[in-house]
Amino acid sequence: MIVSFMLIRRGLCLLLLAAFLTGGSLRAQNRPNSERSPAPIDQINPLVDIVLPRLYPIIVMDVSPSLGDATLINRINLVVALGMMDAAAPYHETAVGMYTRIPRMPESERSDRNINTAMMHAAYQTLLGLLPRREMVWRDMLSDHGLNPDDESSDQSTPVGIGNVAGRGALQGRLRDGMNQLGNYQDNTGYMPVNSAYILHDPSRWQPGLRLQGTGVYTVQQFVTPQLANTEPVGAFDPREYRAAPPIASDPEDWGAYKAQADAVLEASANLSDEQKLKAELFDNKILSLGLSFLHQAQENNWSPADTVRGYFLKTAAAMDGSIVTWQEKARYDAVRPFSAIRYIYGDEPVMAWGGPGLGKREIPASLWRSYLPEADHPEYPSGSTCGCYAQAQAVRRFTGADELNWTVAYPAGSSRIEPGFTPAEDLTLHFATWTDFARDCGQARVWAGVHFPAAVEASAAICGGFGDLAYEYFRTLLDGTAPERPLAQSLPADPWLTTARAQEPVPMVVPPPTKPTPESCQAVSDTIYITAVNSGVECQPLDTSGLGLLAGYLDAVKLSGELTLGVQICFRAGGSLLFFDESSSPPTVTQLTTYGVSGMVCGWINRAGTVMLMSSKFDKVSGFDAAGNSIAPLTDCQVIGREHLSFRDAPGGQRLDIIQAGVRLRAVARTAGSFKVDFQGDLGWVSADFVLAEGDCG
């Protein structure tokens, strides 16, 4: 099917709107105008006209307000495109799915309506699993176009069943791929920065930035998704076999090189042109740069909806695979960003540079220098943005057989995100004739933006085109049907180089130095609990368990009170999870603390009075309590039977992991007031008590 230019252009306009809405409140959910009937399902491009216009605003609101967090954006795009591609595979002459092998449909069934219906249901299933909070948006995505979101059919002879099976297969296939989706993408590698946001202990290593979030409100950067380094790639390769050369200029022992690369960034900063500023902003927005450049290519080549999805999957897989190696090397070198090095070298000495929005080139103290774009939340070397651009460019070249791009992006006068009203001084149009031009400018823009040294860009440019080739080689086997059925993705073992290199490093400082010594009463609370307070006046007491309810799984605890506004770090020698009782409310509220490791201890952070308890590692992620603070009761002789299809979730009311067919008998091992914990095919998860029949001693 040839998609009309009008339909694709309409979709691109919606995408551009979402891409430019990178700040403030985004209230619309992109619902179609109720006075205008949507186009028939066989006359649209589902990815361009429906899925991405719904998805991109949600990414802005829920995932990445700046659209600069490539690792999370790519992960979501990859799974959605994978589900849609696998749903289209049974309608192709030779293609097979990556995680599903659905029987090939006869030629008489290969209509645009059937293919688009299958792809829409696949997108729905993946989005429901990836971003469950927005279920109503995804339901409307189907119902607004005449499809039924409640049709959970798995009949692989129908478009709906094919889409549901392919979407669930893609979601399950990547659920445990190493990105820790089930843990809300939280770091599970134990990364800790050597430097604090306040003190540069090691000028060769990454320093988390201190960011102003509002009047008087600051946050400290965290390394975003360092576990990406342990994620299973799409292409058939071992990331541990790909290494970037060391960033030798980031070591101040070679002072000449260290200063020279900082001076290169300052020179670029001082001489920014309007074109360079806008290219920096363009490539910082991963949806606008990586997404819309590809969709422009799809429009120029008149690709069918299925081919658009296939190309979108390929380009996203290439960028994702490149990011895995990039993040591996970022964790390995943990390299300093330009802002830290410039302040370290020059202190308060004057330097010539960009002075801030609308201020142009001027002399300022180096300690006040700022990059044109905010620094990303991860170490500097090598450049992740550059890698994504080079990987995508090569993947699309292989897909199309040509380097031509011919893409333009128009900026009206004063439309800059960083310098609104000033830049550009007059209307300006960026033009990228080829993918080669696109990738080169993408890399250079990171230096112009002041967020990377030139060596980081050069390192990614040297190796990342190859990930486009590797992704394409695997994609081609999916398309010609020779790809073997793929097992569910699994996290890679930790990088052995990193494990060895970091083993002897001192434990990094994780809180600002105390203003006064930590009170002796807290230091000596026990030989298994260690307290670090930022300020004095903190009091610690043994746990009083009265009135706290069922505490099965309780191992150790401490009650803290006094001057806690600046924060306290609590570490327990034994392993497990940390539960916090906020006793200021009535009844006390129960929450689980985010934990991290320090010298083999499990640690958490609080800034208000309450009791911190160490719970057994065998406890559920809700630590033995449901969201209302009610205890989870164990069961020994209980079975439940689904009265209808059941959502199998990771916690009561949590994220859906799978669908359990109606009538399946399940062994229940625990329950709360409204949910049962069951064993489903060897995995433990939760189902609603409202939709099952219980047999035996079920409490």
Image: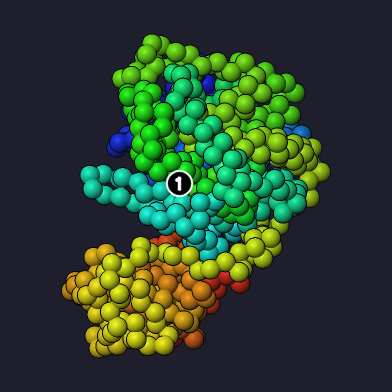
Foreground pick, 547 / 440: 440
* 89 to 442, vertically: above or below: below
Residue 304 spot, x, y in % from top left: 63, 25
Residue 157 spot, x, y in % from top left: 66, 45
Q: If the image is split into quadrants, where does the C terminus sit?
A: bottom left
Residue 574 spot, x, y in % from top left: 48, 82
Residue furthest toward the right? 482
Describe residue 443's horizontal placement relative to residue 105 as left or right: left
Rendered image quadrant of residue 84: top right
Residue drawn at x 27%, y 71% is 516
* 14 to 595, vertically: above or below: above
Q: Does residue 40 appear in the picture of this structure?
A: no
Describe residue 372's horizontal placement relative to residue 104 as left or right: left
Residue drawn at x 44%, y 18% is 274
Secondary structure found at label 1? helix
Query: Pointer 1: what residue?
Result: 344
Q: Which amino acid does label 1 sit on?
A: Tyr
Foreground pick, 23 / 18: 23
Residue 126 spot, x, y in % from top left: 53, 47
* 272 to 64, vertically: above or below: above
Residue furthest toward the top? 426
Q: If the image is split into quadrants, where does the N terminus sit?
A: top right
Residue drawn at x 36%, y 25% is 362
Q: How crowded is mark 1: few (under 14 residues within 10 Å), some or many (20 or more)?
A: some
* 287 to 499, vertically: above or below: above
Foreground pick, 85 / 539: 539
Q: Does residue 44 appear in the picture of this structure?
A: yes
Residue drawn at x 49%, y 86% is 636
